[in-house]
Image (tube, rainbow, N blue to C red):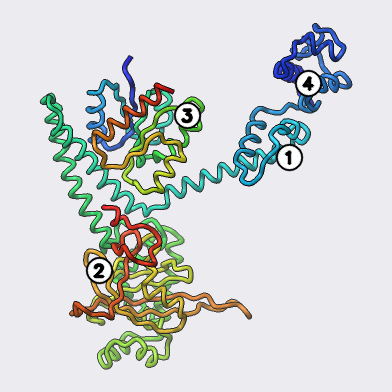
Amino acid sequence: MRDTLTGSRIRERRQIAGLRQAELARQVGISASYLNLIEHNRRRIGGKLLVDIAAALVVEPSVLTQGIEATLISALREAAADAVGQQAELDGLEEFAGRFPGWAGVLAQMHRRVVSLERTVETLSDRLTHDPHLAASMHEVLSTAAAIRSTAAILADTEEIEPEWQDKFHRNLHQDAERLADSSKSLVAYLDDSDSAEDRRGVPLEDVEAFFDSNGHHFPQIEEGGDGADIDLGELDSSAAKTLTRDFLDVYASDARAMPLIEVKAALDGAGLDPLQLAAKFSVDLATVLRRLAALPDGYLGRPTGLVVCDASGSILFSKSVSGFAMPRFGEACPLWPLFQALNRPLVPIRKRVVQLGRTAAVFDCYAHAWPQAISGYDEGPVYRSVMLVRSVEDVAQDDQAVSRVGPSCRVCPNSDCESRREPSILSEGF
Amino acid sequence: MSRRVLLIEDEPNIAEAIRFLLTREGWQVDTHADGTDAVQVIQGANPDLVILDVMLPGKSGMEILRDLRELEDMQGLPVLMLTARGQSRDREMAENAGVSRFMTKPFSNTEMLTAVRDLHAQATQS
């Protein structure tokens, strides 16, 4: 359908072409007053006269009848400017839009969508690049430091300062000093991976870990013969967290059936902790033993013991924290952990003594094993998961050469000469 | 006519210090502490210069800046961005969003005043 603005477009095009009304009228063989009526949309126009006017204005007739919206032209120009490795024929842009308005619209729409998606990606990246807890803590500390620095400099450098401002800045300094002390403490506690689970709620996996933490990673009902379904999950908010917890409890129940508590205790009392021997004794794989050991009640293993499970992508699926061995809550862990080395050597039992660099630099014995998940069909390769038991070590010789250095995650690792570093450490930036 | 700066910062003590310093330099300082409606507040205030914190409640400074630069009459407005995140990636992101100057917390008062003077001088020359 032609709209009623053809006359306005003719006027616009004539002005762009620098033609006076009388000149254009003469070229197409009509009177100037008639062209004036057309240009003010008071006379309909079509047929040969339209074609003649279009020819005189050097545009496609459709440009005059259907119009090329300024926004479309502008969008096409932007698309041409943003194109990489393609030189668009800008002088033919209006002709293209006039002759193929549908395609021009599609191109403009696609370009708008690309721009919009790029912005979304940038915004999400802005939000997600940094661990939100760490970013918030850092922001708090640095903002308070900024306030203190600025206020202190005002008090030190300003020669004549009104008493009321002076009082106000003194109060602010005191307030900020207290804030800095509190925020520094909470940041250090965070970097040390405090055991507090209260602030970790909200993400399903964290809810699962908080649930296991609150139960000490041990479920007497299951030990007595029950199964995962017997455990009340009422404290979990989301259905995702409930589903995940149910899955982990099913694994727990299966491990408990394969390695009954009383028999495990007897084996530990008799032969001590050797996961391979336990695997042979109970006829189970090493992964089962490692998971089972981490689920024993406090005191069975003598020393604090943690666990971490990841999938083949390296994403951490589950963890039981152990004091002194920081496990990142978001993002990636240190690639030097035996957990990930096990993925390179599936089914090979790995034992390694490690020191995790950081403020405490504690030493741990790690046992790791990667085992295949169920195979979905013929000719399908197995997808592995890896598990690592982390057991604290006492009385380590200072010069023990067999201890490997690992970190928590690159962002908070002080090891500046690590070949495996993915990104700079915030510690190396003077934080 | 006095020069006007709009300070968008949710830390009251930083805002107070900056207000004190700039007022002494002859600026009229307006403050705002929320990111959600910051773009509208900037449009309404029509300041000579904006000092914008990155981490604000409601909407980040980066998002505010991007939205601001979409507006035709806000493309030349000098924006000094304050952030606790000074990594090169953050700088790059701010530059892509259209920042005029990027300053990492904690900054010195001299640094901040110099940045404000430079930005204002550049804006008035152009």
The reply to whether residue A1 is visible in this rendering is: no
Q: Which residue is mark 3?
A: B75
Q: A196 left or right of A245?
A: left
Chain letter for mark 4, please. Answer: A
- Distance from disc 4 to disc 1, alpha carbons, whole Å, reads 23 Å
Q: In the picture, residue A258 is in which quadrant? A: bottom left
Which residue is disc 2 drawn over?
A324
The answer to whether marks 1 and 2 sit on the same chain is yes
Q: Residue at x 27, y 59 (%)?
A: A191
Tag nearer the camera, 4 or 3: 4
Same chain for marks 2 and 3?
no
Q: Position of residue A244 (x, y in %)?
A: 44, 67
Q: Nearer the viewer, mark 2 or mark 4?
A: 4
- Which residue is denoted by mark 1 in the rendering? A103
Mark 4, mark 1: which one is toward the viewer?
A: 4
Distance from disc 2 to disc 4, alpha carbons, whole Å, reads 80 Å
Do residues under tags 2 and 4 come within 8 Å of each other at their CB atoms?
A: no
Q: Secondary structure at mark 2?
A: loop
Q: Residue at x 39, y 69 (%)?
A: A335
Residue B23 is situated, as x and y percent measured from the top left of the image, at: 25, 23
